[in-house]
Amino acid sequence: MDNLYIRKILNGDYSGFSYFIDKYKDMAYSIAFRILNDCEDAEEIVQDSFLKAFDSLKKFRQDSKFSTWFYRIVVNNALTKAKRKKLIKKDNDFSKIENIEVEKIETVYSALSQDDRKKYINFALDKLNIEDRLILTLYYLNENSLEEIVEITNIKRENLKMKIHRARQKMYLILEQELKTEVKDLL
Amino acid sequence: MENKKEEEFAKSILSNSKLNIENADFNKVVMNKIRRKNRKKILLHNLRNYSLIFVGIDLLIITLLRLLNIRITEMSGIISKLSLESMSAQLFLVYFVFLIVSIFIIVKFSENGYLYSKTDRFTE
């Protein structure tokens, strides 16, 4: 379907571009927000990325999915902005990530209301560094393959699996610490 | 097995982290920007073509006048004081500057390529 609309746009019917906006805006926004942590900045980046994608559509070789190519533009734009705003910081100390009891977290987490779940997961993501937030979002939320994540983020393929594992463990650690009171109540 | 379970749990908790753009006019805003950009592009494209035709015709006239050895020296007014050589030199200069400025503007406005950074972008 994407290719059909790309052909349409390249043949001069640029109104077909609204199909891409409808389809990808929310995921692009999620990615940009996870990098920038600011609603307005993220929305601006998504707008800018759509304009860049429209301008560069002729150069899109279609050897990858449109979404992969587009998310790469979003990530590049958002990272440039994050660097300009000096948002890229050193990682927190996550030395205890090997001793996490995921089952306990799962029990407590499943007892939470939907709103609380959102609150806790956003809090946990907020504590992670940009790279971890980004790869978790791409891998678990958008369900991108490892190859697609390599293409979007430029992270080396051989490091990616380990990075995903570590990011996941870090997220569990933060959740474990945050849910401690709930864990105590339950046990 | 445990790893798979952890993966499934991560997927289920991260499904709660999806965000939506709340601006209802987002689509309209982007499409309007695209329309404006497109109009500007067409305008610049036409401007470039017309300027090239304009400059080309002028250069052709000057070359023809020189080739046919036509001298414009007995005219009245200010122009009568100018020889054809000095006029053509001035015209050449004016159009050369004009051409350089137009090319610069056109190139500046039509830069639509997207650069992909190959460096490690997660470190300062």
Image (cartoon, coloured by chain):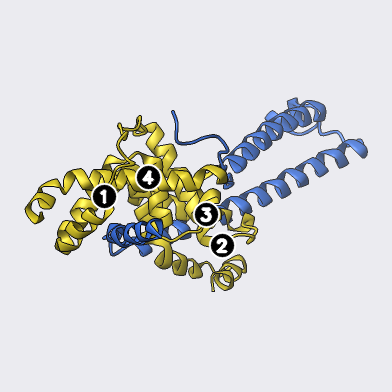
Chain colours: A yellow, B blue
Q: CA distance from mark 1 to mark 2?
A: 38 Å
Disc 4 designates what residue?
A167
Tags 1 and 4 both on a single chain: yes
Check disc 1 and give the amino acid type: Glu
- Mark 2 element type: loop
Apparent side of residue A113 relative to residue B54 in the rendered image (left or right): left
Tags 3 and 1 both on a single chain: yes
Q: Nearer the viewer, mark 4 or mark 2?
A: 4
Q: Please rate how many residues cluster around mark 4, counting C-alpha atoms within 10 Å: few if below 14, some from 14 to 19, many from 20.
A: many
Q: Which one is earlier in the sequence, the residue at label 4 or at label 3?
A: 3
Q: Which one is earlier in the sequence, the residue at label 1 or at label 2?
A: 2
Numbered mark located on residue A146 in the image: 3
Q: Which one is earlier in the sequence, the residue at label 1 or at label 4?
A: 1
Q: Which one is earlier in the sequence, the residue at label 3 or at label 2?
A: 2
Q: CA distance from mark 1 to mark 4?
A: 16 Å
Disc 2 designates what residue?
A65
Q: Is the C-beta separation of discs 1 and 4 under 8 Å? A: no
Q: Is residue B22 above or below residue B77?
A: below
Check disc 4 and give the amino acid type: Ala
Check disc 2 and give the amino acid type: Lys
Q: Is the C-beta separation of discs 4 and 2 under 8 Å? A: no
Residue occupying the point 31% across, 57% down: B14
Q: Is the C-beta separation of discs 1 and 2 under 8 Å? A: no
